[in-house]
Image: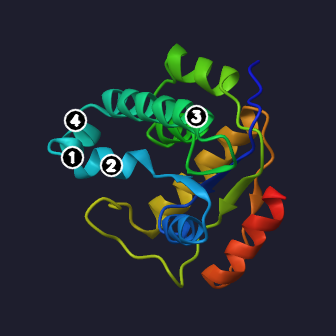
């Protein structure tokens, strides 16, 4: 098992639960960040069609993008806050009722995050759908359960972010990074 020498924090959990907002605040506070790769893929031409027509292909694209971001983090030389990680790909496949390819399983087992895994629980008060966040509320809750279960299956212990304003969530994140 590969243990990185730098600390990571990974934001995971429900769609629309404030992960991207917290990531933006972390970046503004001077922390190195890694964006949600799924949103980048979905925003690219053909991205939504890939997700709908070839979910395994979409998962493979996410896996490749996460691997790129993971390697980039090693070059930054300090803590990096990721918006989702390898087990989120497994969770996407789980909630979609699809098998987990060996490459995804291997990445989850071998490319390990060293730091807190912070779960943004489903939060109805802030949830909104948008062009890439196509899940309804019930699907968002199911996605949260699936990705949280995937993180646990791969040996992580996600800690819930409090349901508080972003400034307080940022303080919580910074405390966990040390």
The number of numbered discs placed on residues in the rendered structure image is 4
The residue indicated by pointer 3 is 75
Discs 1/3, front = 3
Say whether disc 3 or disc 2 marks the residue closer to the N-terminus. 2
Q: Quadrant of residue 176?
A: bottom right
Q: Can you say whether 122 is above or below 56 in the image?
A: below
Discs 4/1, front = 1
Badge 1 marks a residue whose secondary structure is: loop
Badge 4 marks a residue whose secondary structure is: helix
Q: Nearer the viewer, residue 31 or 122?
A: 31
Circle 1/circle 3 CB separation < 8 Å = no
Dot 3 surroundings within 10 Å: few (below 14), some, or many (20 or more)?
Answer: few
Q: Label 1 vs label 3: CA separation?
A: 26 Å
The residue indicated by pointer 2 is 40
Badge 3 marks a residue whose secondary structure is: helix
Q: Can you say whether 14 is above or below 48 in the image?
A: below
The residue indicated by pointer 1 is 44
Circle 1/circle 2 CB separation < 8 Å = yes
Badge 2 marks a residue whose secondary structure is: helix
The residue indicated by pointer 4 is 53
Dot 1 surroundings within 10 Å: few (below 14), some, or many (20 or more)?
Answer: few
């Amino acid at each position: 098992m590969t243990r990185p020498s730098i600390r990571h924090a990974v934001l995971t959990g429900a769609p629309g639960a404030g992960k991207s907002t917290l990531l933006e605040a972390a970046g503004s506070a001077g922390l190195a960040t890694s964006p949600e790769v799924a949103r980048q893929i979905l925003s690219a031409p053909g991205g939504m069609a890939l997700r709908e027509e070839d979910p395994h292909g979409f998962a493979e694209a996410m896996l490749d993008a996460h691997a790129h971001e993971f390697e980039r983090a090693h070059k930054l030389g300090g803590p990096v806050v990721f918006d989702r990680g390898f087990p989120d790909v497994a969770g996407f496949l789980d909630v979609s009722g699809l098998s987990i390819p060996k490459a995804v399983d291997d990445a989850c087992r071998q490319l390990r995050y060293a730091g807190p895994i912070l779960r943004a629980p489903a939060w109805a008060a802030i949830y909104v759908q948008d062009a890439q966040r196509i899940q309804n509320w019930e699907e968002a809750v199911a996605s949260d359960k699936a990705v949280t279960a995937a993180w646990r299956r791969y040996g992580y212990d996600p800690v819930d972010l409090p349901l508080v304003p972003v400034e307080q969530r940022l303080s919580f994140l910074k405390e966990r990074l040390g």
